[in-house]
Amino acid sequence: MPKIALAQIKNIPASKKRNIEKIEKTLLEAAKKECDLVIFPELSVTGYVLKDLVYSLAEEIPGPSTEKLQNLANDYGVYIIAGLPERGERHLIYNSAVLIGPEGLLGIYRKKHLPTYGLFEEGRYFTPWMKDIEVFETPVGKIGILICFDLFFPELARILTIKGAEIIAVLSAAPDISRQFFETFVHARALENTVFVAYVNMVGFYDGVGFFGGSHLRGPLGQLISHAKLYEEDLVIADVDYDAVIRARTIRPILKDLRIDDIKYLYHALTE
């Protein structure tokens, strides 16, 4: 039964060195409590509020930052999920998350939906990922990853579930105005897919905008398992029993009742 830590940290914008130092300090604390997997917020390596600095901070994966994370994973014997801007093909920039273990880089997830409205400007800097998404099989479970606004699109969590995810990690940089939405959608994605959902949000105030934290873990019947503080850094740890996924799908056989014709009708409605 893996022990999972939600690492709700306050990022330092544009300082990889200080953020990685903070990540290491958190990993040390998590390792002392015998955690197996530690999940950090969106863009945790660089900070979220970057604007044009994202172009100079982005790096290839594998790259210098992921090498440092791999060394930390090996030193502390843990698996890490963390976010950073990735420089991809043709110098396109992705809002990415990496899954790294003691054995090395296990997977990359690139954000598909980029909010570009109101105070959000991601579409100005990042390229949306337009290809398929994966589930990563690890010694600590079959893990799917989403990033923040991706949670608003239930199709993504459903795809990860159908591909075998036992837990979906959601890395987030959500401000106060979005708190109600994320609390609702984390609950919904867990319940409608009978899967664990681990939501990890950043905290702090940047350019006058507050990020509320409130990281939490829900079980496959939507039940709240653990919850971090609001507006403070926190490390929340919980044991995850994947057998609960099997039990939940017996009690609530939602996936059994999926119908391909509904998906076809959705496609036709979108393409008419």
Image (cartoon, grey):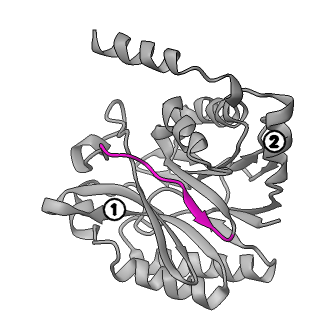
> In the rendered image of this protein, does residue 43 appear above or below residue 151?
below
Marks 1 and 2, how far apart at CA: 31 Å
Seen from the viewer's position, the closer of residues 83 and 177 is 83
The amino acid beneath tag 2 is Leu
Asked if the magenta segment contains residue 135, the reply would be yes
Along the line of sight, which residue is nearer the eye, 188 or 119?
188
The image shows residue 73 at horizontal and vertical percentages of 58, 82
**Crowd band around label 2 with a 10 angstrom C-alpha radius: few (<14), some (14–19), many (20+):** few
Residue 81 appears in the picture as rendered: yes
The image quarter in which residue 138 lies: bottom right
The magenta stretch spans which residues? 130-139
Q: Are marks 1 and 2 in contact (CB under 8 Å)?
A: no
Label placed on residue 224: 2
Mark sitting earlier along the chain (1/2): 1
Q: Considering only vertical position in the picture, is 129 above or below 204?
A: above
Q: Provide the secondary structure element on which disc 2 rests.
A: strand
